[in-house]
Amino acid sequence: MANLKEIRNRISSVSSTMQITSAMKMVSAAKLKRAQDAITRLRPYASKLRYILENVSSSLDLSENSFAEQRGDAKVLIVAITSNRGLCGGFNSNIIKRVNTLAKEEFSASQVSVLCLGKKIKDIIKKTDSYFVNETLAPLEDIMGNATFDRTSEIGEELMRLFKDKSFDKIVLVYNRFLNAANQSIEVEGFLPIAPVSAEDATPSDYIFEPSKEEIVSELIPKSLKTQLFKAILDSTAAEHGARMTAMHKATDNASDLKRTLTLSYNKARQAAITNEILEIVGGAEALNA
């Protein structure tokens, strides 16, 4: 059995860890409320705008809407969204595994590039030689520390330019969708080309365009794509805070259980030491009386 000093040191260390995890849990809970409000407000708008975009795109010719051109998947760009920090359970590792699965299975015959939004996946992907790195995208990767719509728009514009220039035939988003504080789901969402609406979901295509088709292509479609990317980033941010809050809650509970176990061991060891001292005193007194 460990001596009393070692157990006291372990109890002190566990108590310090418990204070840190508890504080991180409260910080994540406060950030989660703001992030959850942001994605809750944006999600209906982004979904409706995307639906309108898909319906309008189906009525336009490819000459009028190059963003709907289906070119196969010879060159694929995966936009992977993680966090800059860890301590959030499997939040980042699940995205990294999903990206690797897409590259090795679904797009195994394609030239795959990865745009890393978040330091955690960037640290992993940059160490491998299996992905093509586009130099024009590298300066856009450090966004997760300050993910505003203006900064997201820069990335969206670059992605649209690369698609129009045929640098990539397909662009997909991979991110954690926020469900609640304890649950997230990994989403693989097509970004470009714009997918046509299924026949049963499509609305009548006899549109009266106001303003003109050209203005819709130049204004509505880019705005919708930028909003879709921004929604994915906000979803990932809210999911990150939820995952970290849950992970820190579990870590605090585990530290509390460990501290309780160590305290019990300390009390047992202390009681054993006291009993030994009493036995030594009694034994010494009996030896003097003998």
Image (spheres, helix red, strand yellow):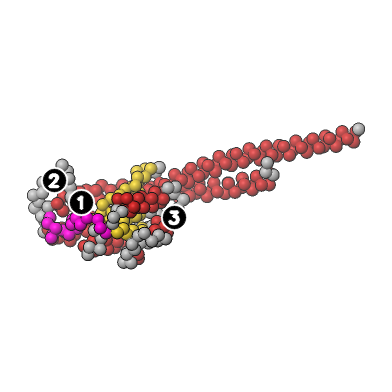
The amino acid sitting under disc 1 is Ala
Q: Earlier in the sequence, mark 2 or mark 1?
A: 1
- Image coords of residue 252 (percent x, y): 51, 44
Name the residue nearer the viewer: 124 or 116: 124
- Image coords of residue 271 (percent x, y): 71, 37
Residue pictured at 18% horizontal, 50% vertical: 196
* Label 1: element kind: loop
Q: Is residue 40 above or below residue 80?
A: above
Q: Residues within 10 Å of mark 3 (few under 14, many from 20)?
A: some
| Residue at the disc numbered 2 | 203
- In the picture provided, is 255 more to the left or to the right than 101? right
| Residue at the disc numbered 1 | 195
Which label is found at residue 85?
A: 3
Segment colored magenta:
60-76
* Label 2: element kind: loop
The amino acid sitting under disc 3 is Arg
